[in-house]
Amino acid sequence: MTKKLWLSIAVLAIGASLLVAGGVARPASCRGDAPPGEKPGCGGGGTMKINLVSDTDYTDPALSYYTVGWELEYATCMKLLNYPDKEAPAGSQLVPEAATGFPKVSSDGKTYTFTIKGGLKSNTGEKLSAANYAAAINRDLNPKMQSPAGPFIRDIAGAQDVLDGKAAKASGVKARGQVLTVTLTKVSPDFLARIAMPFFCAIPSKLGVVPEGVNTLPSWGPYYVSARTPNRTIELTKNPNYNGARPHNVSKIEYTVGISQDASLLQTKNGQADYAADGLAPTAYADLASTYGINKSQFFVKPELVFRYLALNNDRTLFKGNTSLRRAVAYAIDRPALNRQLGAYSGKRTDQMLPPGIPGFKDAALYPLKGSDYTTAKKLADGHTGDGKAVLYTCNRSACISTSQILQFNFKQIGIDLEIKKFARAVQFEKEGTKGEPFDVGYEGWAADYADPFDFINILLDGTTIRDNNNVNFSYFNDKAYNAKMDAASKLSGAARYAAYGKLDIDISKNAAPLASWQNANARLFVSSRVKGVLYNPVYGLSLAALSIG
């Protein structure tokens, strides 16, 4: 993946922990928080042209789980609560969107009651009600969908029965007119942050279960996906019935898939394209900074709550039960060399899962950050390398290829011949998410869905969530003792929660090493000169709805 992009922390009302990050200033006339009586947005219409090297994974909110896809979902989804089109810190604090306000919470802290605003319509004219959100939750839970959303809502009463195929609907989800009630099995401090994820945005109440995902569907948000030809084009069109508070400036947003990074760079400079949503070649960024400056007009650099890592597949013979070899890999990889391959302003080296800015992060010297420690790595690997062969899955872009060649050399030093297999990013993600896929190492990255350590540690490593498809635990790590520790940490709140996760981060990274962390990343954005109102939302990245053509 990587998925989403963000930075520091703010504590929300009703106990949800969220983040704060650096944002990009924009003209007051383009604000999403227009004064009373003034329509939000810059207006102007026109068509925004966005390039992609490879397609996003899905445009179906139940399945979409990739940075490009969630950026798109931010422009199309109508959620109960959402992050406003603002820079940090306001852009990282949840506000009611479809809900009239924050939910009422029962005295035991387990039942949340949302009231849905009246008068909200999708592009097809369907009126929004609580049923649209209940449908989304139950569709996400349906085992035939194999949605990645499942691990985030297992604490809803009856959710596990739906996941197990024993029920069609979660007993803890009730929709009556404009009132949605969600009852949990336990107190969950991060529930509001989780329910604000795009997985749970409103869908047509009669939308069926489509395991491969739907390419187009109605939306109550500022835009809707009006057309998609996989691996070729995606089209977003302004929702003619949208009367919410968010900006909605351009008339259409057109994605073209299959444009090389070099071509995107040239087209964006010339104004033939407006934005390369999945990035440019690593060699481009130093020149862009020199030409345009940083965070001034067209080139922007923003820190993210992201880490890059190698997933070590515990479902395969080489790494299964082989802690010594997994730790050897963490000592052997050359983090400075890997970092350099991603170009100027790409990020900083790390050896931990939690990024700085996530509550609970505690810096610890676990593995070498200044280069490989082959002496220690060889000692750990000795007698544990099996047949001496491993398969690496990576993406087919230049940076993935060059970093993979460095990894190939690093692995060779500890007695492992690393075979490199390259795929389009969405294809790689799908393959690694399939249990039994024949890879040993996955070249991966993870961006926060919301700023809580659960989203890094439990989501990536809790073995009880592993299923046949759409996994994000690419390490296929399933250790009963650590599963129990993760579950215990998730039930805590406040300082105790963060302290527990800080210890877990260090413990798992040092003593189990199911993955090898190597970078905390930055977002690097380049837009054409005709793009105005650039906003880097600390949770979803570039706000497409806030952009205008000038």
Image (cartoon, rainbow, N blue to C red):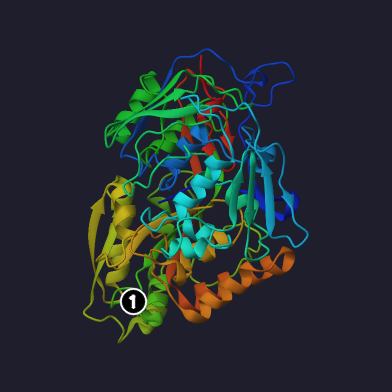
Q: Is residue 436 at least partly visible in the picture? A: yes
Q: Position of residue 436 (x, y in %)?
A: 27, 68
502 sits left or right of 234 in the view: right
216 sits left or right of 95 in the view: left
Q: Residue at x 72, y 39 (%)?
A: 101
* Label 1 crowd (10 A; few <14 / some 14-19 / many >=20): many
Q: Is residue 370 at least partly visible in the picture? A: no
Q: Residue at x 24, y 53 (%)?
A: 422
Q: Is residue 135 above or below residue 530?
A: below
Along the line of sight, the residue nearer the viewer: 307 or 35: 35
Q: How many marks?
A: 1
401 sits left or right of 504 in the view: left
**Residue extending furthest front?**
176
Q: Residue at x 28, y 65 (%)?
A: 409
**Residue extending furthest right?**
107
Judged from the image, the secondary structure of the residue bearing numbered disc 1 is loop
* Residue placed under numbered mark 1 in the picture: 319
146 sits left or right of 257 in the view: right
Which quadrant of the structure image shows residue 444?
Answer: bottom left
Q: Amino acid at mark 1?
A: Phe
Along the line of sight, the residue nearer the viewer: 96 or 276: 96
Q: Position of residue 279 (x, y in %)?
A: 40, 38
Along the line of sight, the residue nearer the viewer: 162 or 153: 162
Q: Is residue 433 above or below residue 7?
A: below
Q: Is residue 12 above or below residue 268?
A: below
Q: Position of residue 379 (x, y in %)?
A: 37, 84
Q: Position of residue 235 (x, y in %)?
A: 37, 27
